[in-house]
Amino acid sequence: MIRSAVEYDLPELLAIYNHYVRETPITFDLEEISLEARRTWFKQFGTEGRHQLLVAEVDGRIIGYAHSTAFRPKPAYQRSVETTLYLLPVHQGAGKGSALLSALLERLRAAKTHRAYAIITLPNEASVRLHAKLGYQPLMTLSEVGHKFGRYWDTQWMECRL
């Protein structure tokens, strides 16, 4: 089941996200995020419009989430968003991420969003393939743009024309 997130979901979403903070370079956060900080973060989302947060559930448990946020803060960017997807590792590769991101893209189309951008830490062939399957095209690679776990990481920027 895919649905809009509610504040009650935050502890589960936080557990998923903090796994990626601790264990992977996927996010460039270096320290785990607090529940209080996530409550503040949650306030940017609505159930309609360009900034949404969706969760995927299996047997009543959240297994992942996708969201869209402002691409850049200046007003001329308002019709563009950045999309993000996180799944519990055990659910990767089973089509759940594709379903979740597809649902988000449909909502973004309904909200008359012009472009969606994904910024993917490399290497992450599975994420690049998933985004390409859903219509994202590669734009550029920024080399060594982030530093985590004692090394530099590249990011692949991808664009979906909605």
Image: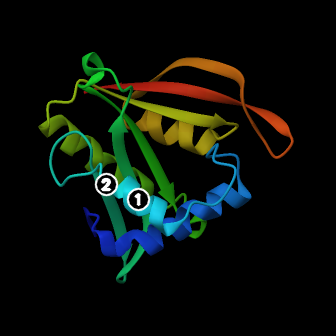
Residue 148 vs 78, above or below: the answer is below
Q: How is the image coloured?
A: rainbow
Q: Nearer the viewer, residue 101 or 18?
A: 18
Screen quadrant of the C terminus: top left
Residue found 38% across the figure and 57% down from its top: 40
Residue 51 vs 145, above or below: the answer is below
Q: Which residue is mark 1?
A: 65
| The disc label shown at residue 53, or none | 2
Name which of mark 1 and mark 2 comes first in the sequence. Answer: 2
Q: Circle 1 sits in a helix, a strand or a loop, which is it?
A: strand
Residue type at numbered disc 1: Tyr
CA gap, disc 1 and disc 2: 7 Å
Q: Which quarter of the picture shows residue 6?
A: bottom left
Residue type at numbered disc 2: Leu
Residue 95 seen by the camera:
no
- Viewer-nearest of discs 1 and 2: 2
| The disc label shown at residue 143, or none | none
Pointers 1 and 2 in contact (C-beta within 8 Å): yes
Residue found 70% across the figure and 46% down from its top: 25
Disc 2 packing (10 Å; few <14; some 14–19; many ≥20):
many
Q: Which quarter of the picture shows residue 59?
A: bottom left
Q: Nearer the viewer, residue 132 or 40?
A: 40
Q: Circle 2 sits in a helix, a strand or a loop, which is it?
A: strand
Disc 1 packing (10 Å; few <14; some 14–19; many ≥20):
many
- The answer to whether residue 73 is left or right of residue 52 is right
Residue found 53% across the figure and 25% down from its top: 157
Q: Nearer the viewer, residue 91 or 26?
A: 26
- The answer to whether residue 11 is left or right of residue 5 is right
Residue 139 vs 107, above or below: the answer is above
- The answer to whether residue 136 is left or right of residue 74 is right
